[in-house]
Image (cartoon, rainbow, N blue to C red):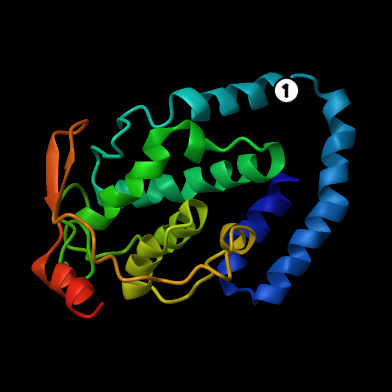
Amino acid sequence: IIDRCNNVSTMAGSFREDKLKEDMAETEQYVLPLIEELMPEHPEMKPWFDYVINVYRTKYPAWAKEDGGWNEGPSYWSYYMGYGLDSITALRLATDTDLFKERPFFRETVWYSIYQCPPGCPVSPFGDGTQAGPFESPVLWTFARLLNDPRVMWFAAQTYHPRFGGIRDIVTDRPSLKPEKPGDLPWTRYFPGIGMVAALTLRTVFSAVMSS
């Protein structure tokens, strides 16, 4: 079961959208009923499940505060958010548990990435991978959909154009949501949890404001 889900997820980037939807339908039709049949035989699974949900609702991530900052830099932020959003999306779809409503961190953290690595930024200025420019926009697409925020979608579209990078993007798609230039953003943002002030580049601000 785990191998099936892992294969669908890891190969999703190379699939056509219709192929992804087909595999998702097959998983729902054949794999999920199998999980339901196995659950009574493995009662130890429920405490594991409850523990994971409790961690996401109360503790994860342990090294960040409600303001959305991330003390390991944008590279690790992108890595951990990529995995975390899979679980957050699954919880929202399967259990109506919406961590974006319950946890301020998940509503705010996308701005940490945007202010750290705005479009036009030549490097990632904090943490590992400092030589890289903006690279986390596949994750920004998901944040834009889950937050229903056209400004976040605008930032995602500046550096990474494909709308779909996997199953997570298919199930969170909002066809009516369109990018909008974020002309109302402050130039700087303070993340007190990690003691950092980050600023959008002049190039980013002027391109957003002057062309709006």
User: In front here: 205 or 161?
Assistant: 205
Label 1 sits on residue = 46
Q: Position of residue 141 (x, y in %)?
A: 45, 62
Residue 120 is at least partly visible in this image: no
User: Does residue 212 lie above or below 92 as drawn?
Assistant: below
Query: Which residue, as the protein is rendered here, is positioned at the far bottom?
Result: 211
User: Does residue 126 lie above or below 176 as drawn?
Assistant: above
Q: Position of residue 27 (x, y in %)?
A: 79, 55
User: Does residue 13 lie above or below 3 as drawn?
Assistant: below
At x 87% / y 52%, what residue is drawn? 30
Residue 184 appears in which quarter of the rendering? bottom left
Query: Which residue, as the protein is rendered here, is positioned at the far left?
Result: 202
User: In front here: 180 or 34?
Assistant: 180
At x 66% / y 27%, what residue is drawn? 49
Give the total number of marks visible in the rendering.
1
Q: Position of residue 204 (x, y in %)?
A: 18, 69
Quadrant in the picture for the C terminus: bottom left
Label 1: how many Cα within 10 Å (few below 14, some 14–19, many 20+):
few
User: In front here: 96 or 163?
Assistant: 96
Name the secondary structure under disc 1.
helix
Q: Position of residue 171 (x, y in %)?
A: 64, 59
165 left or right, relative to 212: right
Residue 197 is at least partly visible in this image: yes
Q: Give amino acid for label 1.
A: Lys
At x 26% / y 48%, what residue is drawn? 112
Residue 18 appears in which quarter of the rendering? bottom right
At x 23% / y 46%, what residue is drawn? 73
48 left or right, relative to 208: right
